[in-house]
Image (cartoon, helix red, strand yellow):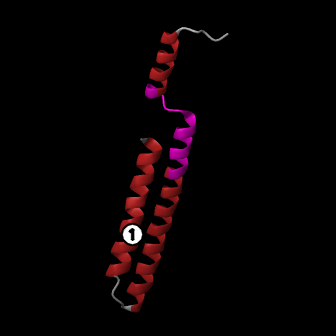
Amino acid sequence: MESSNPNSKAEDKESLKTNPSTEAHDKRRRIGFFLIGIGAFLCVFGFLITMVMISQGANFNVALYSTTGLGGVSLLGGLVAVLG
């Protein structure tokens, strides 16, 4: 039985503002886990490329700071999306 009270509709709108829908929360969580996965991959990939470049005596600054930095930023963004 649905009430025809206009105040109940206003209360429903208020509860939606304070309690986000589970669909929106699940979507944000999926995006967060995706970003965490990409960030972890970039950090590991940057580490491996840096180790190879160090063993060959090449300049490793670009591989070290770009891939690992992007991986760290992606990890933090994913954690904010999951926990936020």
Residue 16: % across, % down: 49, 26
Is 23 rendered above or below residue 30? Answer: above
> What residue do we see at 48% from left, 11% from top?
7
Is 35 rendered above or below residue 61? Answer: above
Residue 14: % across, % down: 44, 21
Q: Which residues are magenta?
A: 17-31
Is 14 rendered above or below residue 22? Answer: above
> What residue do we see at 44% from left, 67% from top?
43
Is 78 rendered above or below residue 49? Answer: above
Q: Amino acid at mark 1?
A: Thr
Seen from the viewer's position, the closer of residues 61 and 29 is: 29
Q: Quadrant of the C terminus?
A: top left
Residue 2: % across, % down: 64, 12
Q: Which residue is mark 1?
A: 68
> What residue do we see at 48% from left, 57% from top?
35
Task: Please give left or right for residue 12 compared with residue 70 in the image.
Answer: right
Considering the numbered disc 1 on the image, is that residue within a helix, a strand or a loop? helix
Task: Please give left or right for residue 14 compared with residue 34 in the image.
Answer: left
Residue 11: % across, % down: 47, 16
